Image (cartoon, rainbow, N blue to C red):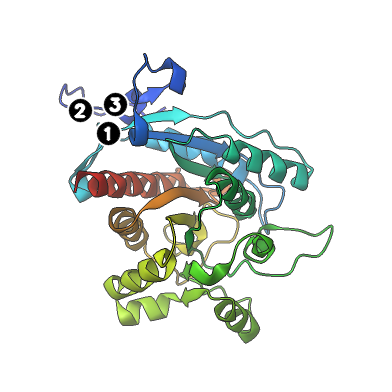
Amino acid sequence: MYERVVNDQSLKWVSEAWVKDVEDAAGADFGSDLITFVEIPFDFAVSHRPGTRFGPAAILEALNGFSLYCTDKRADLSSLRFRRGAPVPVSNDIHQTYSRIEEAVTALPPATMPVFLGGDHSVTDPILRGLLKRSGGQRFGLIVFDAHFDSRPPVKGQEHSGHWMYTVQDVYSHANSVQLGVNAPIYSREYMERAEQAGVMVRTPYEIRRDGWHHTLEEAIAHASRDTDGVYVSVDIDCLDRAFAQGTSVPNGCGLMAYEVADAVYEIARKTKTIGLDIVEVSPPLDDASNTAEVAAHFVMNYLAGLTERRRH
């Protein structure tokens, strides 16, 4: 647990904003101000170096060291309350674990905003399946921050986290999907063409720098939210340049800057209706001084700041 740097009565802390459960909130109805964190400590499908099973706990520890004021965005989060859902039970049977994730997502209370903490990126497939069931058939868009396409056709018995954009297509159309930050040097032209033919808007770090974040986000939000009931955001921490995210399975050279992703997550949550967020691939055993987990916690704060500002206006 983080040590308190100051003892100031004006400060309110994330660690003080937790409710044990919806029923334990003294009868209060937090409605859309209740944020449920769902931990998915699963890395049996990690594509390279394991350790992301420890990511959720590390991100929450870092988050508990933050106050409820997002200084960078001048956003007061003190109206929010946080619920720590039971961690999804995982096993070395990946398909059984995926079923459990889908069931846990489907069973979430309807009024709460979910934040999912992984875990490797394969967990986003069952999360999306659960959200589709939970929403009662609503249509939603998807904005993904990732260095990888994650669209390789799976080989039975060799499944890993690089398949989820491919496997989820049996229940989800990518007509409203966006991938930002793809630049890993392990693909052929076919992957880019296949993604764009499926309807995915792909922007590489070079294209984002060339066109600017403001223009890119306007395009991304328009693409993901067109004729949809909301947008889901997925952040793979390896979208970042490895200078900011050593603690991940596949560190990425020449990736995005940490502040760029923090600002983008904030703007997405502020400008459009979102239905949830996941942050995946944080691996504490590979993390130097918990830097990667702390960056992930900043992404959570920026998402919550965007939600708060959207509701305020």
Q: CA distance from mark 3 to mark 2?
A: 11 Å
**Place of residue 258 in the rendered image (x, y in percent of width and height, measured from the top left):** 36, 59
Residue 276 visible from this viewpoint:
yes
Q: CA distance from mark 2 to mark 1?
A: 7 Å
* Residue type highlighted by circle 3: Arg
- Picture quadrant of residue 106: top right
Q: State the quadrant of the N terminus.
A: top left
Q: CA distance from mark 1 to mark 3?
A: 10 Å
Numbered tag placed on residue 11 in the rendering:
2
**Place of residue 161 in the rendered image (x, y in percent of width and height, measured from the top left):** 66, 58
Name of the residue lying farthest toward the top:
26
Crowd class of label 2 (few under 14; some 14 to 19; many from 20; radius 10 Å):
few
Q: Are marks 2 and 1 in contact (CB under 8 Å)?
A: yes
- Front residue of 121/1: it is 121
311 vs 25, left or right, is left
Q: Residue beneath label 3, please?
A: 4
Residue depth check, mark 3 versus mark 2: number of the one nearer the observer: 2
- Front residue of 297/165: it is 165
Q: Residue beneath label 1, please?
A: 67
**Place of residue 183 in the rendered image (x, y in percent of width and height, measured from the top left):** 51, 75
Q: Are marks 1 and 3 in contact (CB under 8 Å)?
A: no
